[in-house]
Amino acid sequence: MAIQAPKGTRDLLPDQIYKWHFVEGKFRAMCESYGFHEIRTPLFEHTELFQRGVGDTTDIVQKEMYSFQDHGGRDITLKPEGTSPAVRAFTEHKLFAEMQPTKMYYETPCFRYEKPQAGRLREFHQFGIEVFGAPDMTADAQVICFAQDFLDEMGIRNVSLEINSVGCPNCRSSYRKALQDYFRPHYDELCDTCKSRFERNPMRLLDCKSEEDQKLAKDAPSILDYLCDDCRTAFEDLQKDLDAMGIAYTVNPRIVRGLDYYTKTAFEFVSTGIGAQSTVCGGGRYDHLIEEIGGPEVPGVGFGLGIERLLLLMEENGAEIPEPPAPDVFVATLGENSRLAGLALLRKLRRAGLRADMDDLQRRMKGQLKLAARLGSRFTVVIGDDEVEKGVVQLKDMTAHEQHEVPMDRLVEELANDLR
Ligand code: ATP
Ligand code: MG
């Protein structure tokens, strides 16, 4: 049998790629206009970066990473997310020594060994933004605002913003204990994954995808009752800023996020549309991540947005994505002399900035015109031996079904006029 793509990966074929180019173009443009600049980091990093950054007790590090030893015996992992590498680069290149904040964005493939289904792949892609060096909630509010504005611009209506505070290491320890006390009598009812989360990461129990566990989690204690004064004030500040910008949200104390490094703000944009994979964008604040991986004491806040889920949602919302433009002009030729003249003309048209094409398979005239129609070319230029001799071409308007003769050296000008 022919070799197939690995499970959980997807090819993006040329006839679909315009959708990606569209969202990528919009995302980049928005980043630049909101003052973010791109960072590109390697596809793989030292495994230790994610163990320390994402956190040893998370599902990602425990069971989802693509890790291997290279030929030099180094422990390497394919990026499962974009924040830790951005933080590593920020620290390594001492960007913290410049005037803060540092505002960066990225687009990256991510690799996680998961059970593939709609909106859940083993290789998927994320857009992300990060703000480093801004301790106040105004940065969090603006990161959230960016995500909302981007989803709006992409034509997505059926998502809602849910926010929470996951506190800081201080308030979290008493909350973890309260959670364990709550779940302990139900321990035997928990799914196997949650049984293993019970000790190492009880907050993740709130985020389980299994229905029974979700039912149990409904009456669990709320983190909001355990926040220290600093975290409580910060959460109030965040809501004030969001209100001021007119951004609607719901407070959901069960939003905990899968990565260990979050502090204070956690948020998700959730849809009811794309099945169980309902979170299109998630993010929050990570005040200790940079120190955790050996950098200075600098806070950060950002989000990751799944591009495959974004495109699923856009489809569901009937968002319009403009199809790529057809050729402006197709050059059709009859006989060897005219083929040579056609080649020279094709080059001239392309260098003049027109989208121009020609048949590469030496088909008969009928086949060439069929190809021109198939490509949706706006004009076709027909050259035969007579035309070569007279230095003219027949210019066919494929929509008006009209044809007239044009001197070869006036063709570019005439087409440029007609296409305007
Ligand atoms: P989930 O709870 O759905 O597993 P997560 O909390 O693991 O998501 P994050 O690590 O916050 O997700 O990643 C940010 C975004 O990346 C998600 O909101 C989602 O849109 C996308 N994403 C995460 N995992 C996958 C995946 N396996 N396939 C496709 N997209 C994904
Ligand atoms: Mg996940």
Image (cartoon, rainbow, N blue to C red):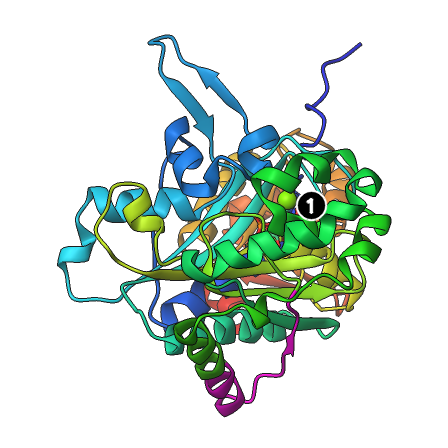
Q: Is residue 333 left or right of residue 356?
A: right
Seen from the viewer's position, the closer of residues 268 and 316 is 268
Figure quadrant, ligand 2: top right
Classify mark 1: residues with Cα within 10 Å, few (<14), some (14-19) or many (20+): few
Image-quadrant location for residue 151: bottom right
The residue to which callout 1 is attached is 15
Amino acid carrying label 1: it is Asp
Q: Which residue occupies 39% across, 44% down? A: 84
Task: Mark yes or no: residue 18 visible.
Answer: no
Residue at mark 1: C-beta within 8 A of ligand 1: no
Res 118 quadrant in image: top right
Q: Nearer the viewer, residue 323 or 161?
A: 161
Farthest residue toward the left? 97
- Side (left or right) of 195 relative to 228: right
| Residue 420 % position (x, y) | 53, 74
Residue 282: image quadrant is: bottom right
Q: Is residue 2 left or right of residue 54?
A: right
Residue 9, percent from left and from top: 67, 32
Residue 231 drawn in magenta = no
- Quarter of the picture containing the N terminus is top right
Q: Is residue 325 above or below residue 65?
A: below
At 47% across and 35% down in the image, what residue appears?
79
Residue 7 picture location, percent across and down: 72, 26
Residue at 57%, 37% (x, y): give it: 60
